[in-house]
Structures are given as structure tokens and as C-alpha cells.
Amino acid sequence: MTANLWEAFNRTVNTGPERIALLHGDRAITFAELRNRAIDYSIALRDTQDVDVSARVLLLMTPGLEMAAAIVGIWALGGIAVLMVADEHWPHVEHALELTSPKAILSNVENLDSNVSQSVPVLRPSDIPHTGQSAMEAPRIVSTDPASIVFTSGSTGKPKGATQSHGNLIAGCCSVGEYLGLLADDRILCGVPWAFDYGYGQLLSTVVLGVTQVLPEVSNPFAICAAIDAHQPTVLAGIPSLYTYLLQGLSPFRESKIGSFRILMNTGGTIPGPVLNELLSLFPDAQLFLNYGLTETYRSSFLDPKLVRERPDSIGKPIPGVDIVIVRDDGSLADVGEEGEIAHRGDFVFLGYWNNPEASAKALRRDPTLPQGAVGRPVLFTGDYGMLDADGFLYFRGRRDHQLKSMGVRVSPAEVEELIHASGLVREVAVFGMKHDMLGDEVWAALVAKESVENIRNKVQAYARETMSPYMQPRRFLILEQLPKTRNGKTDYPALSAQAQETASSSVVGE
């Protein structure tokens, strides 16, 4: 295996320089073109900004040729690509600048906040001259050197910069590509920005494995359908909210040329049962991979597509090179079937949070499987709750900091969400808790009704009484047209809590 991502990319290019790396709108970019442009970025960053080994460069860019070239060009110098979405909110940008002290910002966004230019130089693609060079000498970069910083969602505080090494990213990409069975002529379509670990993983499949990537013009279901029709991708990398909008929203997904897909992937949460069943019905011949991982790990587990109908609520077994254990709050190992914190052992564990040793020490801890006094690799404590069954299958029960205690009993919001989805009444649902003097956590449910459903609150409330224990039943509701989302397409629970706080004096909201 090659030592660093620049070497891995060159191997990919040399294997087929005229093969297509990116399909973006009506433009096709070859691997040779991508390398030439990456070298342009390397030369400009080295000569004008003194970017060298371990120097950080912050990217505020939309996915496309320029962003891909910029990332690869930074790797060629041994620098560290700091990834953020192009339209990131200024407070998060300011936090990233303070945390990582970058040598420069690369951006293709118009009207970038004027505050940026006061802090650090901003370069745009038009500032990077075309040199015509097709090769360059790179510094020595070893597999343990940091390659990139990807920020966590920041749902429970300021975003943390998860730092991954060259070796981890290459090994993780190869492992995932192997169990997915990716082929050289596959085309991956992903609507998730590269600033998020899942989208970044698809770019790495292009750079390391040579798989063509299809980019929608913008990140929404309509643009994704247009990209499907134009480029006939074979792999769809989705998240639950995307599949929900494609199948239950207004997009023309069913009328699109979807027969080309042979692999569907999901991560970032559980696909609602009705949506999952629709996917299985719509794509009887495609393989559906249900995956689990975090920004701090490349990937942790996946469910064999043959078992999706049999175990739709499982997130599978650990990927090759990984072991999963469940840990009690006191640090001891949980029994089979007992819920606790999911801990990721083995490969693909990140280096830590950039410039945040306290958070790094909390996430990376001693291996709980080792005898007292033994020394081994640190284990990632994920902050997620789950359990392993007798056959070794992993089940996700939600974020540790989202767990509720209602009427003295622990409640998993993810389990309540799953039950409400099974009613067939809602397009989206999010369950969360608000502090209550008598109940402990009062269970709230934010509901987005299906178009044909009226009086959604009463119907869901009646369904909950029939299917849930009293401590699980939502007592308050937000009735919404759509759920608020974070930048990576996940439900924004802090935003929902803020809405609930504002309207806590009303027993029914939005109906």
C-alpha cells in the first residue's frame, strides 16, 4: 500500500490518465486533467503562501474540479486540507481559523464574508495560474502524517476538527471499496458535500480507487435526478433524509433513469421503515448497504445486503480490520443484548481533535478489553448507544447525549422515531426531550405529515397509546412542514429544542 494520498493518486492517474475522474453538469474531467490542476495549486500555495508539510489550508469551496484539485494539491505538499462547506456560517469559519491557524483560505464562493480577508489571505481559482506542468517533486510524507481535518456537526458545542492520517484514509477507502465490490467502471453519485466525512469518502474512492464521481449541480433531490438522467451512475451514496425526499417528496425520482444503479448505500442514521421497504421494492436487483461510522472513523460496520430484509434495524457487523464492543457507563463490558456505549477498536481510528487535547482524551481511551496494566492502541468511544446480539450484529440506539429518562425509565428517541415511522402517517419524525419537574424528560415529537394525512397529532397520539409503553409516548408535539437540518442533512435537534422552548406554554404547536 502506498504511504500517502499523493502517491496513491499518482498511481490511479498512471493507470488510466484519460479515464474520467469527475462528471459535473456537462463537463467531464480526466484524471490527467485533475493532476495537472492539482499541481497548479501546489505550486501556487508553495510559492505564494509558504505551504509545506503540516501547514493547514482552509477550503470553503463547492465540490467540483477546483476543489478536488485543491485538496490533492495540498496533499502533494504534505499540507493538511481543512474542509468546510462553501456557505458555512461565519462563527464556524471564525472558530476554524482560530483553531487551525491556516496559511491560506481557498474559496470559489462569491461575496465571501469580508471578515475573512482581515485574518488570512483568500485565494480563488482565478488566482491559481495554469502552469502546464504534469509532474512535481513532493516532500517525504509518511502514512501517519495528518492529511485532513473534517469538522464534527457541533450539535453539542463548537465543532471539533477530527484529524485523519494519510494511512488511515487510504486503508479505510480500500477496505470499503472491497466490501462494496466497487468496479473500475462504476460511477458514484453523492449529494453530500465533501466537507462531510461521508462525501469526503466518495471523493477518496475517486482519488485512491479510480472510480468516476458524478456531481449534481447543487445538492438537492431535483439536481440529483437531473444528474442521474445525464450520467447514469451505478452507485448512489445517500443518507436517510435524501432517500426520504427522493421517495416521498416532490422529486421526479421514480421517473428518472434509475435502472443503472447496482449499489445503494446509506449512513448517517436509520432509513425509516416505509422508505426502506420502498427502496427494496423499487430496486429488487440492486445491493443495499446499510453502513455505520463517524467523522472520527472512516467506517465502523455494514450490513450484508442479503440480510437487509431479515435484519432491517441492524447496522451489521464490523468492517474488516475493526472490532466493536459495547461498554457500560462504569467502563466494564456490557453483556450480549445489553445497551451501552459503542466503542470502535482496531483500524481507521482518527488521530484526535486538532488543537483540542481534552476532547481527544475523552474520545480516545484505553482499550476496555485489555487486562489491567496492558498497553494497546487507543479505542474510540463513539458517544453512540447501541447493543450487540448473540450473533454479533450491531444495533444503534441513538446518541448518548440524546438519551432520555422519562418517568424514571431510559428512553431511546431513535426507537420511538422508528415506531412512529411504522404508523405510515408521517414523512419525517424527530423525537427529543425537554426537562420536566415531574417526568424528568418530557418526550416531544416533531412531525411532518404525509400529504394525505390530516389531524396528524391526534392520529399519532392514538397510535402511540396502542404501540408504546406510557414512558415512551410523546406528550407534546411540533407539527412542521419539514424538519430543520444540519449542513450534512441530518436532523437539527438543537433547533427543534429551541422551537419547543419558545412554544412550551402550548400543548400543540403548528396545527
Image (cartoon, rainbow, N blue to C red):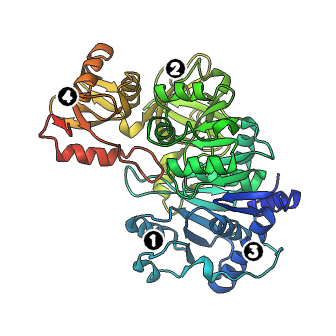
In the drawing, what numbered circle is on residue 207? Answer: none
Pointer 2 residue: 335
Q: Quadrant of residue 427?
A: top left
User: Image point 55% across, 70% down: which residue?
Assistant: 58
Q: Secondary structure at mark 4?
A: loop
User: For the residue carrying disc 2, how many other residues have a C-alpha within 10 Å: few (<14), some (14-19), or many (20+)?
Assistant: some
Disc 3 to disc 2, C-alpha distance: 53 Å
Q: Which of pointers 3 and 2 indicates the residue nearer the eye? A: 3
Q: Of label 2 and label 1, which has the lower sequence position?
A: 1
Asked if labels 2 and 4 touch by Cβ distance under 8 angstroms, the answer is: no
Q: Quadrant of residue 480?
A: top left
Disc 4 to disc 2, C-alpha distance: 29 Å
Q: Secondary structure at mark 3?
A: helix
Q: Residue lying farthest front?
A: 255
Whole-percent x, y for residue 3 in the image? 79, 58
Disc 2 to disc 1, C-alpha distance: 43 Å
Q: Of label 3 and label 4, which has the lower sequence position?
A: 3
Amino acid under disc 4: Leu
User: Image point 52% across, 73% down: which residue?
Assistant: 101
User: Residue 376: in sight, yes or no?
Assistant: no
Q: Secondary structure at mark 1?
A: helix
Q: Of label 1 and label 3, which has the lower sequence position?
A: 3
Asked if labels 1 and 4 touch by Cβ distance under 8 angstroms, the answer is: no
Whole-percent x, y for residue 234 in the image? 70, 41
In the drawing, what numbered circle is on residue 39? Answer: 3
Q: Of label 3 and label 2, which has the lower sequence position?
A: 3
